[in-house]
Amino acid sequence: MGSRRKFLKTSGILSALALTSLPKFGKAIGLEERPATEGEVRKPVVISTWKHGLAANDGAWKVLSANGTALDAVEKGVMVTEDDLTNLSVGLGGLPDREGHVTLDASIMDEKGRCGAVAFLQRIKHPVSVARMVMEKTPHVLMVGNGAQKFALDNGFKLEPKKLTDAAEKAYKEWLKTSQYKPVANIENHDTIGMVAMDANGNLSGSCTTSGLAYKMHGRVGDSPIIGAGMYVDNEVGAACATGVGETVLRICGSYLVVEFMRQGFSPSEACKKTIDRLVSKNPNYKEVQVGFLAINKKGEHGAFALQKGFNYALADNTGNKLFDSDYLLK
């Protein structure tokens, strides 16, 4: 009887400790609220940033549902967003820099740790595919500007017309009236499509593509093409991507940090929150910007956390393709 009482007492203490240690930021509803059971791995699965991630996920899911690789999925998925000329933050439909030029950044990374990226690329429709070609056909990781464009043209990419879309030109002319530059949180003039996926074989890959901050200085490059900042993959641990004002993410190597927190045993949501906490400590003006992180671990569990209200993300798996609201810090 005494040993039974001791067992019950110990169990009660352990249960209480477990309850108090549960994360209190579970608003990012979905799989993260029900941790995978022992030995369970949810696959395939793909997650991506913002509402435009729904269409991107559809493109990725066509690959994953046919037993394709996560690498192919994250490329094909974000290509859907790059193709959408109504999107003002990704691809050639994006808002220009202050000189009137649309400049594109992208990165991609696979389960083997291979990666490729392009930055300050102009007049090429699919920068993510150029990034993949950098990864697969060169000894380099990052190519920029005219050199990246020449590499793309030498490898069969088409040089697109040098002009803004009607919507981007209208917005640019309006901006020129004051020429004031200040990013606005959750207004997608400073956003990205970031995507990470796990395929049926349990392998992870990630991609990121953007036209960058609207009305930025000509030549500015953000976090999206920087491996470890805008996106990072470690096939032993998990994968993460970022969205928002890139300078704040660059200062902490944000996506790499999320993955490293998962390596320490934190859930995807906890890892994203801890990374936001680190970002706040390194950015005095954090209340003026928006940043969100999105992550998946090797069990297929996902999570997200943002600096401010308004960040959402899309998740596609065998149950469908859904949009979730991320929890956030500034309440």
Image: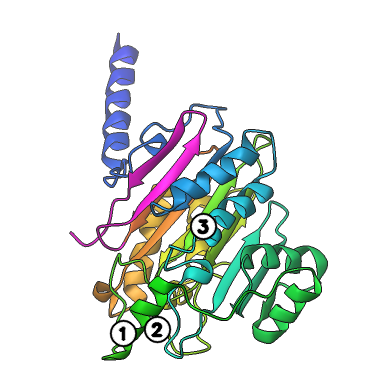
What amino acid is labelled 3 in the image? Thr
Q: Nearer the viewer, mark 2 or mark 1?
A: 1
Question: To which residue does mark 1 refer?
Answer: 175
Inspect this view and state whether residue 265 appears: no
Q: Is residue 262 above or below residue 160?
A: above
Q: Please identify the quadrant where the C terminus is shown.
A: bottom left
Residue at horizontal 58%, vertical 45%?
60
**Magenta segment: does it hold 324?**
yes
What amino acid is labelled 2 in the image? Tyr
Residue at horizontal 32%, vertical 56%?
311
Which quadrant would residue 175 be assigned to in this image? bottom left
What amino acid is labelled 1 in the image? Trp
Which badge, 1 or 3, comes first in the chain's sequence?
A: 3
The disc label shown at residue 215, or none: 2
Q: Which region is colored magenta?
A: 307-331
Q: Evaluate if marks 1 and 3 touch, with contact meaning CB atoms under 8 Å apart.
A: no
Dot 1: what SS? Answer: helix
Q: CA distance from mark 2 to mark 3?
A: 20 Å
Foreground of the two, 100 or 225 = 100
Q: Evaluate if marks 2 and 1 touch, with contact meaning CB atoms under 8 Å apart.
A: yes
Question: To which residue does mark 3 refer?
Answer: 81
Which badge, 2 or 3, comes first in the chain's sequence?
A: 3
Which quadrant would residue 89 be assigned to in this image? bottom left
On the image, the x and y values in percent for residue 323 come to 37, 43
